[in-house]
Image: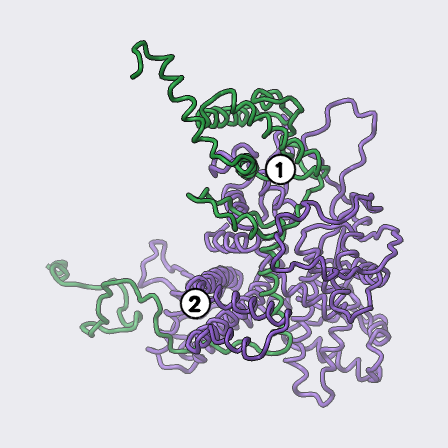
């Protein structure tokens, strides 16, 4: 794992789980698979704390364990999974767009808790939804269950591997750790539960009044201890499926940008591509280079209901898409009116290349971008040829090439004429290796996000005193409003925060929002580059 | 003779034109320090995307950041004991739901050590659920010895330890909750102990023992 990735993982773990879990997590990421005692010894933390940290990390699918010979259990951290924590808001928002508020809360609960049983999820989500509803209305468990089943059917949530049922005839001592198994067909099987009930609204007497000493409350929650019907069956969010959805979104918007500007009927090509992708959702695995071939007739039948384009027009569009040099759609046969596939790998490659071009354009200027595209197109070019083809004066062309070379967007390929590699008798060709450029850019993205998080934490820490003061004032105002206070008194309290302080708070809020928005958008680039690299590596 | 032409004169082995500048041209200054930390860029960054979706995701992100701090998975670092324990601090602790992992899915060694019903400091040694807990047992025994020294009188501390064990067992069996780290538990029990008496324990113990111990060791009479 690169230093940049480790730093980013450290910041994410610290924000989500605190310093102890962060220390253990980062140690595991750095050193690989280790047993419990070694972790405690190397990090200098007490055994109890290490145990607790590992429980938390395993619960959230960030660490896995394996039983080795002689009963030693080793723990291994999954660095790439830790980096996914940056994307949680995007997953939740996607669930909201697809399955509205219920789906959003289900996915949020699963992400916050790592794994949960279905009955627990349904109950919690129903309670939360009931809170937001008007007085007197409650959320029925059945509705939440329905949404859960739909999420499972479309593979957005999946079952966690199960503890195998042990037979009583097992003679030896129980193993030090269970080996969890899951079969492919069981992964999305929803247990037959009859969850009957309604969401409960938290009664106002239970709410945290500010005067109530919280430590006096009983330690255990008010949940009763009856056995849950789906005990042992845990569910987790299926991040791969979300990634597939993001990838599809990316392809559809790319097609829309490219093709639909010039047609009168808006969005037709992208709609066709979206339909094709939707039909291939479950049949094609997420890492396949092509979707399954779809016949033109099938596509025509599956178009959304509102679309009334004739079969001929559809065929024209498909031919247009297949002939496009970007090669998003390919024709694989003629049966059924023409068999078409979507080139997922090529599409990801085009998206990654477009990202690289865009980065160069914004960093170095459009002439540099022209040189970059030129070298990309012609594969290998000598310096003289670059100047000629790009029609840029020699000195400037050299300057730009060297700038890009120093930042590792472009690389040099030496072709010696003589065995002694004498510089005067060697060809130096400029070339773009997309895979390595993408890796380099990805590394920079990780660094950027780490910088953004650090800067945000710094800004917050600088103004900590002011933030605490404003929170206190807000709490006072809220409690005074609850007990009924005059306008004049409220005004007086509000004036405790002076105008320049208010200004400072405004600036802080604006900066933090900007930094957060930056993190989210850099994460979109990270997703694109990671998908491309993963798809390329799998094909090699 | 012809070969001496090169001696004492600089000659390049490659075509100098290809690099981009000719001989004798003024080259840029030598760089004497690292580049600035925040260099000026010619091209300013593109503005961020805005829109309803982006705003919603931003709000989600900030909410999530606050929510995770209140979850039971956020393990607080145990702060060092302050000089004066403030009464209000006990009551300002944020109420967090306890989380009990499903022990069937986890390796056995991650479970907190169970304690038997035997009272007294020896009871900790007797329990040995997981393998390799002997090291931590001796560490605990050492900790116990340190505490005994602090408290001074062996008898009194035995009583206190019995009470401590008793309260620990009660809290363990009553709720079946996961062990918070041992330090936190001991701190909490110490507070309980101190709360029960009106007087500070250490004060009395020192007074009781000071004379007695020194009498044992010294042969001379005390004045």
Q: Where on the picture, by quarter, is residue A421?
A: bottom left
Residue A194 marker: none
Percent coordinates x, y for residue A145 in the rendering: 83, 59
Residue A430 marker: 2
Horizontally, residue A375 falls left or right of residue A295, namely left
* Residue A446 at least partly seen: yes
Residue B179 marker: 1
- Furthest toward the bottom, the residue is A264
Q: Residues within 10 Å of mark 1 (few under 14, many from 20)?
A: some
- Furthest toward the front, the residue is B223
Horizontally, residue B24 falls left or right of residue A193, namely left
Considering only vertical position in the picture, is A308 above or below A355?
A: below
Q: How far apart are marks 2 and 1 (CA)?
A: 62 Å
User: Which is nearer the eye, A16 or A180?
Assistant: A16
Secondary structure of the residue carrying numbered label 2 = strand
Secondary structure of the residue carrying numbered label 1 = loop
User: Which is nearer the eye, A148 or A472?
Assistant: A472
Q: Which colour denotes chain B?
A: green
Percent coordinates x, y for residue A188 in the rendering: 80, 53
Percent coordinates x, y for residue A242 in the rendering: 69, 62
């Amino acid at each position: 794992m690169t230093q940049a990735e480790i730093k980013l993982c450290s910041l994410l773990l610290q924000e989500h789980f605190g310093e102890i879990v962060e220390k253990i997590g980062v140690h595991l990421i750095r050193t690989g698979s280790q047993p419990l005692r070694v972790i405690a010894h190397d990090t200098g933390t007490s055994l109890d704390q290490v145990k607790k940290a590992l429980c938390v990390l395993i619960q959230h699918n960030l660490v896995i364990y394996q039983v080795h010979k002689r009963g030693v259990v080793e723990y291994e951290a999954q660095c790439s999974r830790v980096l996914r924590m940056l994307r949680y808001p995007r997953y939740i928002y996607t669930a909201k767009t697809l399955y509205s508020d219920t789906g959003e809360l289900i996915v949020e609960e699963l992400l916050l808790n790592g794994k949960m049983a279905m009955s627990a999820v349904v109950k919690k989500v129903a309670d939360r939804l009931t809170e937001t509803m008007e007085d007197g209305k409650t959320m029925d468990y059945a509705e939440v269950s329905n949404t859960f089943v739909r999420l499972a059917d479309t593979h957005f949530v999946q079952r966690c591997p199960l503890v195998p049922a042990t037979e009583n005839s097992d003679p030896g001592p129980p193993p030090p750790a269970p080996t969890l198994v899951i079969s492919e067909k069981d992964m999305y099987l929803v247990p037959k539960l009859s969850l009957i009930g309604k969401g409960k609204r938290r009664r106002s007497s239970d709410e945290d009044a500010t005067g109530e000493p919280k430590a006096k409350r009983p330690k255990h929650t008010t949940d009763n201890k009856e056995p849950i019907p789906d005990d042992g069956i845990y569910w987790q969010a299926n991040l791969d499926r979300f990634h597939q959805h993001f990838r599809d979104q990316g392809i559809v918007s790319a097609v829309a940008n490219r093709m639909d500007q010039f047609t009168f009927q808006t969005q037709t090509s992208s709609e066709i591509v979206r339909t094709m992708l939707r039909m291939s959702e479950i049949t094609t695995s997420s890492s396949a280079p092509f979707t399954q071939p779809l016949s033109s007739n099938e596509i025509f039948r599956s178009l959304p209901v509102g679309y009334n384009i004739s079969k001929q027009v559809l065929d024209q569009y498909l031919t247009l898409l297949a002939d496009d040099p970007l090669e998003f759609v390919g024709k694989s046969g003629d049966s059924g009116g023409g068999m078409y596939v979507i080139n997922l790998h090529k599409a990801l490659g085009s998206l990654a290349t477009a990202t690289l071009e865009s980065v160069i354009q914004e960093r170095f200027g459009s002439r540099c971008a022209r040189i970059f595209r030129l070298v990309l197109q012609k594969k290998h070019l000598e310096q003289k040829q670059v100047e000629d083809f790009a029609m840029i004066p020699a000195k400037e062309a050299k300057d730009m090439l060297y700038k890009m070379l120093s930042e590792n967007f472009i690389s040099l390929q030496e072709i010696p004429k003589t065995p002694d590699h004498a510089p005067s008798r060697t060809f130096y060709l400029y070339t773009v290796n997309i895979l390595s450029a993408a890796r380099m850019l990805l590394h920079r993205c990780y660094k950027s996000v780490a910088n953004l998080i650090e800067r945000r934490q710094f800004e917050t820490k600088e103004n900590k005193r002011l933030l605490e003061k404003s929170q206190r004032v807000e709490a006072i105002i809220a409690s005074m409003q609850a007990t009924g206070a005059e306008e004049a008194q409220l005004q007086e309290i509000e004036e405790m925060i002076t105008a320049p302080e208010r200004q400072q708070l405004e600036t802080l809020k604006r900066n933090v929002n900007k930094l957060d928005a930056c993190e989210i958008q850099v994460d979109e680039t990270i997703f694109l580059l990671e998908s491309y690299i993963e798809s390329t590596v799998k094909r090699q | 003779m012809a070969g001496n032409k090169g001696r004492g004169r600089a000659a390049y082995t490659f075509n100098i034109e290809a690099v981009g500048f000719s001989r004798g041209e003024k080259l840029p200054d030598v760089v004497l320090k690292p580049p600035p930390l925040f260099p000026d860029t010619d091209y300013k960054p593109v503005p961020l995307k805005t829109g309803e979706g982006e705003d919603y995701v931003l709000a989600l992100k900030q909410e999530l950041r606050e929510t995770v701090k209140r979850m039971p998975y956020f393990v607080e670092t145990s702060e060092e004991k302050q000089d004066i324990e403030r009464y209000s601090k006990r009551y300002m602790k944020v109420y967090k739901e306890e989380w009990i992992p499903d022990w069937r899915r986890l390796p056995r060694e991650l479970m907190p050590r169970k304690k038997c019903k035997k009272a007294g400091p020896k009871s900790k040694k007797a329990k040995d659920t997981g393998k390799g807990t002997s090291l931590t047992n001796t560490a605990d025994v050492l900790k116990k010895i340190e505490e005994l020294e602090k408290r001074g009188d062996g008898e009194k501390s035995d009583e206190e330890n019995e009470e401590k064990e008793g309260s620990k067992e009660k809290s363990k069996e009553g709720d079946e909750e996961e062990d918070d780290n041992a330090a936190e538990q001991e701190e909490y029990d110490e507070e309980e102990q101190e709360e029960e008496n009106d007087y500070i324990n250490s004060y009395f113990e020192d007074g009781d023992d000071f004379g007695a111990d020194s009498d044992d060791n010294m042969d001379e009479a005390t004045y």
